[in-house]
Image (tube, rainbow, N blue to C red):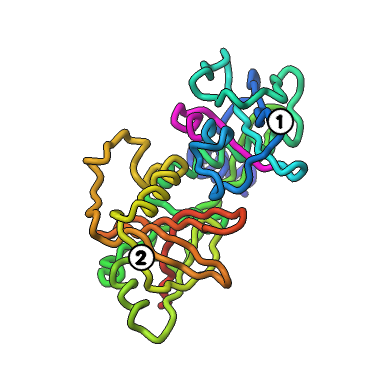
Amino acid sequence: MTTAANWVANGASLEDCHSNLFSLAELTGIKWRCYNFRGGGEYGPVISAPAQDDPVLCSFTRCVQANLLCVWRRRLKPDAKELWIFWWGDVPNLSDIIHHELEVVEEGLWECGLSYECRTLLFKAVHNLLERCLMDKDFVRIGKWFVKPYELEEKHLGASSSEHLSCSFSFFLHGESNVCTSVEISQHQPVYHITEEHVRLAQTSSSPIQVILSPYGLGGTLTGQVFKMSDPAVRKLMEEWSYFYPMVLKHSRGEHDSDLSYDPHSHVALEVIVGEWLHLDKLYTQSQQSHVIRRKKNISETSLSLNEQH
């Protein structure tokens, strides 16, 4: 930091500086609602009930498609789900978005105060929005970091690592009503999308092929077991998860099935083992992004990349 005398001498000002702190939103005038299932929360893990059959998850996907700031969470007691929606100005038209079996259990506005719990959920909703935007730009989430995987060709060409810097976001409230984010930039070991070559290695090699699962960064092992989109169960699973991660079947862009670049006889899904758990993973060919779905208990994951040691 320069002294005042130096500042005058060199003519420096804030316009010449760079910052990792950004103002995202002004909370003044914000409003919110919380919905849950009228029956008291009979719906369990996501994988046990398809999204279109779960009132909270179905409503959440509609909110995402309507570009509403939203987040859903589980309640510990009872084991139920809640949907939170945030907006400014007039109440959005929710008649075709909120499932008829949901009811409002809480609502509020800025003038009545913003509790710590409500503020935390708002930050999570903003983070979800950032995550969807970054995934549309081919980033994958690994833990708190958003990473842009390398293409295999870049490994040989020595591509600039500056194009693959990782970023993470922390949120805080500045003053009384200004939502800000702190962006942390780092560089990690290169990660790569899974390809058919990795699958063949898993099928023929005596050494395990290690992978990293997104979004939580769990380590796993490829089994070499693959599936085709022509398998109705695989197709159904991908369609269900595409509502949460639109790049799976590109629902967010409105493409129709006839436009999807899938060969029904090519490999589009594979198995991954993490400890005792078996995962079903979606494998894009032609250097496209991969996605994984955890099939047991209450944890769901999407997207999978291969960690190559150098």
Amino acid type, mark 1: Gly
For the record, the magenta segment spans 61-74
Q: Nearer the viewer, mark 2 or mark 1?
A: 2
Residue extending farthest top:
90
- Cβ atoms under marks 2 and 1 closer than 8 Å: no
Query: Helix, strand or loop at disc 1?
Result: loop
Q: Residues within 10 Å of mark 1 (few under 14, many from 20)?
A: few
Q: Is 285 drawn above or below residue 247 in the view shown?
A: below
Asked whether residue 72 is drawn in magenta, I would say: yes
Q: Residues within 10 Å of mark 2 (few under 14, many from 20)?
A: many
Q: Quadrant of residue 307?
A: bottom left
Query: Of 263 and 12, which appears nearest the observer?
Result: 263
Q: Position of residue 229 (x, y in %)?
A: 30, 54
Residue at 77% from the left image edge and 43% from the top image edge = 77
Q: Position of residue 266 (x, y in %)?
A: 25, 60
Q: Is residue 214 left or right of residue 257?
A: right
Query: Of 202 and 112, which appears nearest the observer?
Result: 202
Nearer-N-terminus badge (2/1): 1
Amino acid type, mark 2: Ile
Residue receiving disc 2? 194
Residue receiving disc 1? 175
Query: Helix, strand or loop at disc 2?
Result: loop
Residue extending farthest bottom:
206
Q: Is 48 drawn above or below residue 58 in the view shown?
A: below
Query: How far, Cα to Cα, is label 2 from label 1?
Result: 45 Å
Asked whether residue 310 is drawn in magenta, I would say: no
**Residue 23 seen in this snapshot:** no
Q: Position of residue 101 (x, y in %)?
A: 60, 26
Residue at 41% from the left image edge and 78% from the top image edge = 310
Residue at 52% from the left image edge and 34% from the top image edge = 58
